[in-house]
Image (spheres, grey):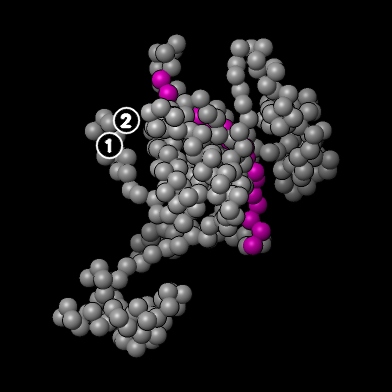
C-alpha cells in the first residue's frame, strides 16, 4: 500500500500547483480517480492549503520593514519592547452585509435577504485607535487598550418628505470627501475630533502642544505595503467585522451601532493576543529579510494564558 501511494504522490507532484484547485480537476490532470485523491486527503498525504494575495514588496520596502521591526527591539537585551506606549491608528470600510452561511433544520427555509445592487453593498469608513492593554497603577485596574472608534459620517436635515421620513428629520450619511475644511469644522466636535488629531499630527503641530502638557509624542508611519505591521489590520478589524455581520443591518445608523458594539465587545485579552501576533510577525519578517512570504507559527496563546504565562 505505501508503494502504491508513493506512485500516486509522484503523479500528483507532476501536476502544477495552479491546476490542483478542485478534486475533480486534480484527479483528471493526474490520471487517477477522485476516490484516490480523497483517500490521500483522509490519510494526510495530501492536504488543503489556502493562499492569500499579499502586497508586492520592493527592495526598499523590505529594508524599511526590517528597520521598523528593529526599532521595537531593545539594543541591550535583544528582546521586544513592551509596546505599551504605542498607539495604532488605522481606517477600514465596514460593509453593511455579505454572503452568510447558517445551519438550518430540514423543515426550515433560509431567510430571504435582498439588496437592490448586489455588487454595491452600502459601506461606511471607520477610524480606530488602540494600544496594548496594560495595568493602570493609578486606578489600580487593568486598562483595556481601547481609545476609540469613529465613523466618517455627518448629520444633515432632510429637505423634503419621502416615504421613509418626514421633512426636517435628522439623518446620517457618509462624508463624501475628507479635507482640511471638514477636519477643522467646529460645528461637530465629537464627530470630527479624530480628523483634527490626524491633520495636526501630519502637519507636526501636535508635538509642540503635547510637550507643553508634559507628553512626548512622536508620529511613526508604518512601512508601505505592510498591513502585517499594524494591529488593526492584523486581526482586530477582521474580528470586529465578524461580530458585526451577526447583526442584521438595514441602514447606516444600524451599521454604526453594530460596529460600536463590536468594538466594545472586544476583550482586552483578544487585543493583547493580537499584539503578541504582531511580535511574532516581526520575528518572521527578520527571518525573511523583510519579506512577507512567511508562515505564521502557532503560539497556542489561549493555552499559555490559561497557564498564567501572560
Left or right: where 126 falls relative to 23: right
The answer to whether residue 301 is above or below residue 187 is: below
Specify start and end residues of the magenta stretch as a single range.
119-135
Indicate yes or no whether the magenta region holds residue 251: no
Displayed quadrant of residue 64: top right
- Can you give x and y, in whole percent of width and height, for residue 267 in the image? 42, 33
Q: What residue is disc 2 on?
A: 310
Q: Secondary structure at mark 1?
A: helix
Q: Could one spot residue 191 in this view of the protein?
A: no
Left or right: where 80 falls relative to 200: left
- Badge 1 crowding class, 10 Å Cα cut-off, few under 14, some 14 to 19, many 20 or more, is few
Q: Secondary structure at mark 2?
A: loop
* C-beta proximity under 8 Å, tags 1 and 2: yes
- Badge 2 crowding class, 10 Å Cα cut-off, few under 14, some 14 to 19, many 20 or more, is few
- Can you give x and y, in whole percent of width and height, for residue 88 in the image? 55, 34
Question: Measuring 62% from the left and 37% from the top, which residue is drawn there?
Answer: 221
Q: What residue is disc 1 on?
A: 304
Indicate yes or no whether the magenta region holds residue 124: yes
User: Which numbered disc flags the more N-terminal residue, 1 or 2?
Assistant: 1
Residue 206 or 283: which is nearer the viewer? 283
Displayed quadrant of residue 48: bottom left
Left or right: where 164 falls relative to 81: right
Question: Measuring 63% from the left and 56% from the top, which residue is drawn there?
Answer: 121
Residue 238 or 122: which is nearer the viewer? 238
- Can you give x and y, in whole percent of width and height, for residue 190 in the image? 68, 26
The answer to whether residue 185 is above or below residue 138 is: below
Q: Main secondary structure of the magenta part?
A: strand
Question: Measuring 47% from the left and 26% from the top, which residue is drawn there?
Answer: 84
The answer to whether residue 18 is above or below residue 74 is: below
Quarter containing the C terminus: top left
Q: Residue furthest front?
A: 76
Amino acid at each position: 500500500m505505501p508503494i502504491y501511494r508513493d506512485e500516486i504522490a509522484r503523479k500528483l507532484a507532476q501536476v502544477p500547483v495552479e491546476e490542483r484547485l478542485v478534486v475533480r480537476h486534480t484527479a483528471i490532470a493526474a490520471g487517477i480517480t477522485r476516490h484516490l485523491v480523497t483517500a490521500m486527503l483522509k490519510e494526510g498525504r495530501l492536504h488543503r492549503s489556502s493562499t492569500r494575495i499579499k502586497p508586492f514588496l520592493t527592495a526598499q520596502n523590505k529594508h524599511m520593514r526590517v528597520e521598523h521591526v528593529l526599532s521595537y527591539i531593545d539594543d541591550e537585551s535583544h528582546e521586544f519592547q513592551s509596546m505599551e506606549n504605542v498607539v495604532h491608528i488605522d481606517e477600514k470600510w465596514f460593509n453593511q452585509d455579505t454572503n452568510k452561511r447558517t445551519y438550518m433544520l430540514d423543515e426550515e427555509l433560509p431567510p430571504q435577504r435582498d439588496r437592490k445592487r448586489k455588487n454595491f453593498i452600502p459601506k461606511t469608513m471607520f477610524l480606530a485607535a488602540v494600544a496594548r492593554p496594560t495595568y493602570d497603577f493609578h486606578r489600580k485596574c487593568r486598562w483595556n487598550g481601547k481609545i476609540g472608534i469613529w465613523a466618517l459620517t455627518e448629520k444633515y436635515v432632510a429637505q423634503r418628505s419621502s416615504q421613509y421620513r418626514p421633512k426636517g428629520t435628522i439623518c446620517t450619511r457618509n462624508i463624501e470627501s475628507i479635507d482640511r475644511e471638514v477636519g477643522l469644522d467646529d460645528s461637530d466636535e465629537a464627530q470630527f475630533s479624530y480628523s483634527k488629531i490626524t491633520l495636526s499630527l501630519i502637519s507636526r503641530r501636535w508635538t509642540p502642544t503635547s510637550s507643553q502638557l508634559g507628553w512626548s509624542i512622536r508620529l511613526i508611519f508604518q512601512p508601505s505595503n505592510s498591513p502585517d505591521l499594524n494591529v488593526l489590520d492584523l486581526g482586530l478589524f477582521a474580528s470586529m467585522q465578524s461580530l458585526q455581520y451577526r447583526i442584521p443591518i438595514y441602514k447606516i445608523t444600524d451599521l454604526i451601532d453594530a460596529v460600536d458594539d463590536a468594538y466594545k465587545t472586544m476583550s482586552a485579552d483578544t487585543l493583547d493576543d493580537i499584539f503578541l501576533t504582531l511580535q511574532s510577525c516581526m520575528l518572521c519578517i527578520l527571518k525573511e529579510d523583510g519579506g512577507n512570504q512567511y508562515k505564521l507559527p502557532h503560539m497556542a496563546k489561549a493555552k499559555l494564558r490559561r497557564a498564567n504565562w501572560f
